[in-house]
Amino acid sequence: MENASYPHTLWEERILKKQNQKGEKDGQSEKRRGHRKIFLAVFLIFFLIVIFYIVRVLFQDKISILGSVFSTLRNFSVSNISKDGKIQRFALGDEELVPMSILKYVPDGHISKIEKNGDITLFVSAHDKSYLMQGRTLKDMVLLAGMDGLPKPILKPDSGGFDKDYAGFGQVIENPETHDLIGIYHTEVRISPDASDSQLTSIALALSKDKGFTWHKMGRIITGQNTTNPGTSVSGTGQPAGVIVGDYIYLYFSDWNRLMPDSIHLARSLLSQNGMPGTWEKYTEQGFRQVGLGGKSVPVIVPFEWDRKIYYTANPSISFNEYLKKYLAIFETNIGFFAATSEDAIDWNSHKLIFEFPKDTTASKSIGDIWYSYPTLLSENTQTDMVTGKTGYLYYGRGIFGQDHQMVRRSFVIQ
């Protein structure tokens, strides 16, 4: 038995030897392939570094353009709004210019929309006045013009008083019972027409009975706390934007009082009272307990304590979003436009960045720096700007430091 098994055992040893030799060769081949992959990766990195250096040396003046392209791609699809607001994604399209004839410094605040019988009307502030645009869609809006063919303001400053230097609509609301248009506007008093960094501001009311073509000023409705005289610093209240909550107009506004960081405050008035002077109540820790004219208030949308890079909040745009089934706020900080949601339009949460600025607006500016401000969210097929949907446009102002700013927009999709 022992001799009979010998040839079989020798055959097995030969086979095993061949397999071992093949395994060693395969292992060496795999090792060589691994070395080649590492070499190729190092070569590719070196090649990219060389190309980048050449581009930087030869096209130094184009680097800012590349940065702008990167910024556009980054802002094209911002997926950073938390799930508790039900927004998984706030996607922004490419930036496009909105032609505004010869108007400068536009928009200069929140844009209001009334959509009725297939017609759209926008109320836009520019420079120091208010203008009206009309069209069938948001893409074919035309400015109201006078007999001379030039844009015709529908509201402008008076020669004296609280709005002698500025009268810009922030919110226009149609009263469903009287069909009056309630126009809430930002006012300024300056020591000179160009002193736009030290004005005394307030919020006033005007009414229209002819669909917004003519207006009757009714007086101030909200003034600031701890105000100073014009020429000292920016002081008072302004940048109004509202939303209907039940029977009330909820009006959000910026408050510059030097007692706290610049932030967004809240007041309300019964819609049935047309928002007339004396009917407004400011929001405090105890609820709506302070008068609109001179009363105290507390912020409802504030600079974020968790992020020391954010120094102010301003320029609110508020709507009830039918897709989210929540109130949606779009507003400005020094580092970008943010979004927040609320169940009751008082307590706001999920503050998330949706559009980042190329440069902090509180930093010193150089000629040529691009800056952004005055956001408004608008959707078509809603009766007013106070209601938005899953899609629409984010309007805002785009400026170059040392020049006037112009109206631009990006399409948006909420997912």
Image (cartoon, rainbow, N blue to C red):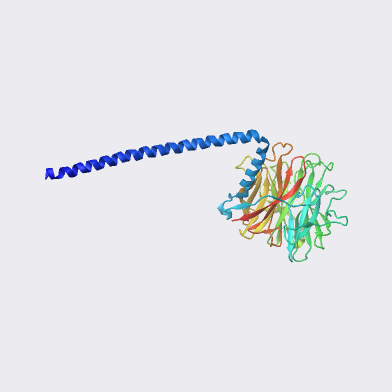
Question: In this orientation, does residue 165 appear?
Answer: yes
Residue 85's x, y, as percent? Answer: 59, 54
Q: Is residue 131 left or right of residue 382?
A: right
Image: 25 above or below 321: above
Residue 404's x, y, as percent? Answer: 77, 44
Image: 299 above or below 309: below
Give the mark count: 0
- Residue furthest out toward the left: 1
State which quadrant residue 372 falls in: top right
Residue drawn at 75 percent across, 66 percent down: 177
Residue 368's x, y, as percent? Answer: 73, 39
State which quadrant residue 200 falls in: top right
Viewer-closest of 365 and 29: 29
Query: The N terminus lies in which quarter of the figure?
Result: top left
Question: In this orientation, does residue 256 appear?
Answer: no
Residue 332's x, y, as percent? Answer: 68, 47
State which quadrant residue 173 falls in: bottom right
Residue drawn at 21 percent across, 43 percent down: 11
Residue drawn at 52 percent across, 36 percent down: 45
Query: The C terminus lies in which quarter of the figure?
Result: bottom right
